[in-house]
Amino acid sequence: MRDKVNIAGVQMEPIIFEKEGNVAKMLAALRTAAGQGAQLIVFPEAALTGYCFTSLEEAVPLTETVPGPGTQRLAAACGELGVYAVFGLLEKDGDRYYNAVALLGPEGFVGKYRKIHLPYLGIDRFLDWGDQPPEVFQTGIGRIGINICYDVTFPETARVMALQGAEIVALSTNWPEGRENAAKYLINARALENRVNYIAVDRVGQERGGRFIGRSKIVDLLGNTLAEAGPTEEEIIYANVYPAAASQKRSIFIPDEFENHIFADRRPELYGAVTEPCNSAKIRGTRSWR
Amino acid sequence: MRDKVNIAGVQMEPIIFEKEGNVAKMLAALRTAAGQGAQLIVFPEAALTGYCFTSLEEAVPLTETVPGPGTQRLAAACGELGVYAVFGLLEKDGDRYYNAVALLGPEGFVGKYRKIHLPYLGIDRFLDWGDQPPEVFQTGIGRIGINICYDVTFPETARVMALQGAEIVALSTNWPEGRENAAKYLINARALENRVNYIAVDRVGQERGGRFIGRSKIVDLLGNTLAEAGPTEEEIIYANVYPAAASQKRSIFIPDEFENHIFADRRPELYGAVTEPCNSAKIRGTRSWR
């Protein structure tokens, strides 16, 4: 049985270059949230390293393999506390570098996701694009999918995971100023349109002149906001979600009209342009830095 | 030049079976909105007929061809007033019946859309599924795409139209109680994720014991709500939108970071499951009434 799961979002301010300090802060928050009963604890994007690097060279010393030293330290704590954790870091894999998120659990390293939508911002300008479709991870508390920041702008990302059976989507993000509407509307929309539980965890504070907007949020599978953080302070938000209920895609907004099914009612035979590759690849090729 | 376009949403209460009265009300609203300077005037789903039919037979006498008598009367008014109009009706085409929306303009009948996502509700239970991808119509005020009600739950619908160049999406809807989060979150999300202007026009009032929730809304291409109607009263909402700006998909939320492009940054090569047909068609086949 995995009925009710308590999930937590650690809205924090990572300090750029201060990996050791960031890990210490994350370990402390992990203990706090676990102490409050959280079973899944989500951290922001690039929580280990910071984000606003001005070159790849500057960031390379902070990158690491996944799994690797950072994930091992956090996984050890997850093992001790019996919790799952999701957090962002910069991954090194040979001569390639990714904006990645690791999923850890009581059993150790569970999996990772490499950001597939890269904005022309911060360290993302210099990284490699993730080249795998978003994966869904089977865990002891449900099936978890991971997104990073800009991914949420693209409805296809959560969709692909929901179609693969995701019950909880965790978004680690670093939303800069101007992305208030992403926090306000997109999180609830992704939950509602896919009937998944959604947790978005942002950072706060300034980094090299850029301000991040907080507003971390936990949304239930009908799109209702269960918990929401403020725009500036470090804080941990908590909510109970029901992962198994996400596998029920029949409409439940009108109890006696139960034959609607938000996946069966899809018309993929009419969505051709959504996966049409040419235009997109062509425009992407015009980026001056590619 | 088609810089600024004033658009209007006529939130009204159609009366079931009272086609003549509904047309008269629509013609009056068309004149009122045109008098206020509106260039595109959007009405709810099934505005001509009502929605809560309990059999196809009951609705058949209210169906008509498109174009046909209802569209001709409204098109004549559009011609006289020099405006575009979007409204919902029940279409008869031989022995097939559709939940349709017609687009009319100063030049007469422009085009139509047949709902491709049918909920198990009202007349939709008995209709044929639209079998054409959503089309985008080139008009004198911009490129217009049309959706109906439940379509908005599926992010693919607006996406397909935006990828075809839609600048304004008009949603004619009949949202029953329970769909408040669609009004609250999905409209803004569709606009923001596709960078299109979005107008959603709902009905109000009760019909055969079912209540509809109003909350018609006009949203700009960054997801900001420009105008919003209340939950119970008939009213007309207005806002200015900028259709041509929707063709600019580069990110504008951070002025000096202009290389983001929300279409070029898509990764359709990783969205395979979004158009995978089997599962969906299979589940759909289980509907007892098919």
Image (cartoon, coloured by chain):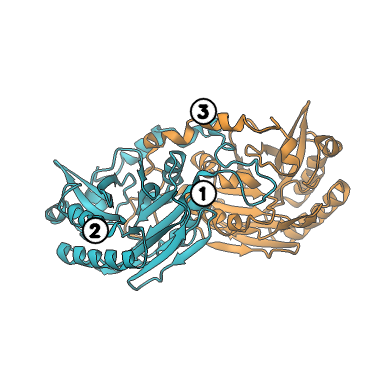
Chain colours: A cyan, B orange
Q: Position of residue B95 (x, y in %)?
A: 78, 26
The residue under label 3 is B278
- The amino acid marked with disc number 2 is Glu
Q: Position of residue B45 (x, y in %)?
A: 72, 47
Task: Please tell me which residue is depicted at 76% across the width and 62% down the height of the picture.
Answer: B234
Closer to the camera: disc 1 or disc 2? Answer: 2
The residue under label 2 is A80
At mark 2, the secondary structure is helix
The residue under label 1 is A245
At mark 1, the secondary structure is helix
Dividing the image into 4 quarters, which one contains the C terminus of chain B? top right
Q: What's the distance in space between the residues labelled 1 and 2, CA to CA?
A: 29 Å
In the visual, does B219 lie left or right of A140?
A: right
Closer to the camera: disc 2 or disc 3? Answer: 2
Task: Please tell me which residue is depicted at 37% across the width and 34% down the height of the picture.
Answer: B269
Numbered disc 2: what chain? A
Front residue of B2/A146: it is A146
Closer to the camera: disc 3 or disc 1? Answer: 1
Is residue B242 in view? no
Numbered disc 1: what chain? A
Is residue B170 in view? yes
Front residue of B249/B151: it is B151
In the visual, does B229 lie left or right of A70?
A: right
Front residue of A20/A243: it is A243
Q: Position of residue A195 (x, y in %)?
A: 52, 48
First in sequence: mark 1 vs mark 2: 2
Q: Position of residue B114 (x, y in %)?
A: 67, 36
- The amino acid marked with disc number 3 is Cys
Q: What's the distance in space between the residues labelled 2 and 3, CA to CA?
A: 43 Å
Question: Relative to A197, does residue A264 appear above or below in the rendering?
Answer: above
In the visual, does A178 lie left or right of B87?
A: left
